[in-house]
Image: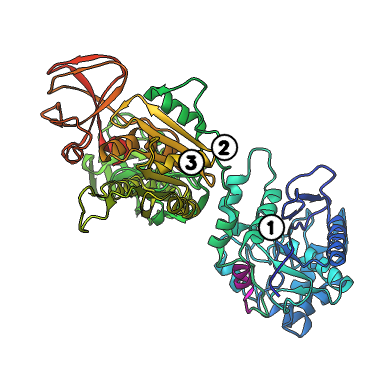
Amino acid sequence: MTGWDRVVMVDWSGGNDAGPTPKKDAIWIGETGQEPVYCRNRTVAEGWLAERMDAALQAGERLLIGFDFPFAYPAGFAQAMTGSDDPLALWSWLEPQVQDAPKANNRFDLAASFNARFPGNGPFWGNGLKRDIPHLPRTKQGYANPFPDHRLCETKAKGSFPCWQLSGAGAVGSQVLMGLPVLERLRRRFAGHISVWPFEALTTPIAFVEIWPGLINPVVRAATGRGDIRDAVQVSLLANALSALAPARLAAMLEVTAPVEGWILGLGFEKDLLDAVSLKPPPLRNDCFALPPGVDWTPVDEALAMLEERLTCVTGSETVPLRDAMGRVLAEDAIAQRANPPLPNTAVDGYGFAFASIAEGDVILPLTEGRSAAGVPFDGSVPPGQALRVLTGAALPEGVDTVVLDEDCTVSGGQVAFRGGLKPGANTRKAGEDMAQGAVALQAGRLLTPADLALAASVGLSTLTVREKLKVAVLSTGDEVIEPGTQAAPGQIFDANRPMLLAMMARFGFEAIDMGRVPDDRATLARTLDAASQKADLILTSGGASAGDEDHVSALLRQAGAMQEWRIALKPGRPLALGLWQGKPVFGLPGNPVAAFVCTLIFARPAMGLLAGTGWSQPQGFDVPAAFSKRKKPGRREYLRARVRDGKAEVFKSEGSGRISGLSWGDGLVELDDGAREIGPGDPVRFIPYGSFGL
């Protein structure tokens, strides 16, 4: 049996009653589609769970309940205590020994009594009480564990804590001692209706499973806002993730053999969980492309402003290793996990000392034996009035705050001599002077570069939460368009747009999806658009965007009730069909390759940046002298294929929009604004290189 009607996740607590006001470090219960439930103590939580299980059984529902504490101890402990390796035998043995009330319990004394059975000072540690308890050390100093420190699953779950630690940040030992008795009582109360995974076959209506919300930490961090209680957020997200998984993936997660130590549900399937719980932005509105009443011809700046105002990010997020983050869009601020540099260090090879211990003028200091090198720090402190050999990048030991350069020193007879005049802190780097721990290393929306990955690594980040790649479907339309390399009949043309647009999408860092060529057949086009909407976040078409008999793109978008034809005051490329198909935005580009290229750069590129999560960006242009003459009429903005040679902008010999060779000839565009212009050689013009658009 693998199907589950309801999923409930529990963030447990081993502490005392948390009071009536919801707070962290209490018990929080998350159920799919429900607000998190706050339980102030274990008695309340046990009652809530019993009622929920009763309701599920009455309704004939199958209920999966996860608890965020280990269901078993490392191998050997259950056998030593009960004479059996069966973890459930340990539950039964432990339950009557635990004394638990809302304001007090015996967990620390009980752990001490268990320790007393074994030689040494363990396995439990972490006395959280003010009084000392024999056999229970407060820290791991002098600690000796007769059993493994970790279960096998904990060695694979980075950041998880061992079940022996009873107190301190992140400790789960108290949760285990105070949680297993509750689970045992519920098992007895609902005998025959509960299976405990992975120790029992899941053939009953209710299953108990062990969870660890740390598996979805990146999404939890992104979803936890100021004032939110993390425990409440993470149980809700994990419940939603498990509910959203395909039944086959959840079944695969449950295919585990660990009869002695148990297992963490989802361990090894972190990507599946993160993908299932990744937050998706809301879809675009049907009227996002509607023009204001009375608008006919649309100036370029107004068209761009409307796109910027109405479009928003449509991509979800995922967490990837640094090696896979190049060229991706950062979905959330990357926070420095440690300072860079983590410790004060030396910027040069030389000799370090305490500045306050030297007098003015020339200096002679005895050398402390040893040295400090990068990765091999000096073990000890440097006494005042002495110096230590230090190498570039080495951590500064206690007693050193200033370094004198090797070349400025004379060394002889165990002493170093150098001229005075150094300033305090010379030739050293302060801890965190590049980046402080907890600072924002990289801001959300950034398109990640190799330098960004170096910075992320330097502050301890091994993964980054990035936007999923924007998926752009590209298709060409028209009976006259055929595949390059085939035999062309009179009147047919080779498809230049599709290879051009697919290459542009890939260069922009998007996932380009080739939907092929579609003839002038409305039903075929509709089916192709349907398929594209299932695969992509955005559909890019060329041809069929005007209002003629064979302009089927605009006709279909009108039928769908979500189409606008923007007649842009632009040369080349006036008609631009904008609409939604099955909720996905469609950019209907002109069929002429030059116009399609220019419209993609000027309109589609910044719009796609918004959809992809990078935000709106204006291409970087430069004023350069013209190497041409031109008289321009008012009313339209013009973009001329251009290149810069000897510091001057040359334009292509023909402005004809059918001259595709001009796109290859140029390395950018000259932009001429909407007004009239009389341009002569040497006059300044705005040149925008293709690289400014990301090409």
Measured in 3D between alpha carbons, the distance from the residue under mark 2 to the one under mark 3, in whole angstroms, is 14 Å
Q: Look at label 3 and name its amino acid.
A: Leu
Side of 30 relative to 442 (left or right): right
Question: Is the residue 158 above or below the residue 95 in the image?
Answer: above
Q: Which mark is residue 239?
A: 1
What residue does disc 2 label?
285
Residue type at the position of mark 1: Ala
Q: Is residue 440 one of those drawn in magenta?
A: no
Residue at disc 1, secondary structure: helix
Residue 76 horizontal/vertical position (percent)? 68, 80
* Element on which disc 3 rests: helix
Magenta span covers which residues? 247-257
Residue indicated by mark 3: 557
Which of the pair 674/50 is nearer the observer?
674
Tell me the kind of residue under disc 2.
Answer: Arg
Label located before the other in sequence (2 or 1): 1
Towards the viewer: 235 or 142: 235
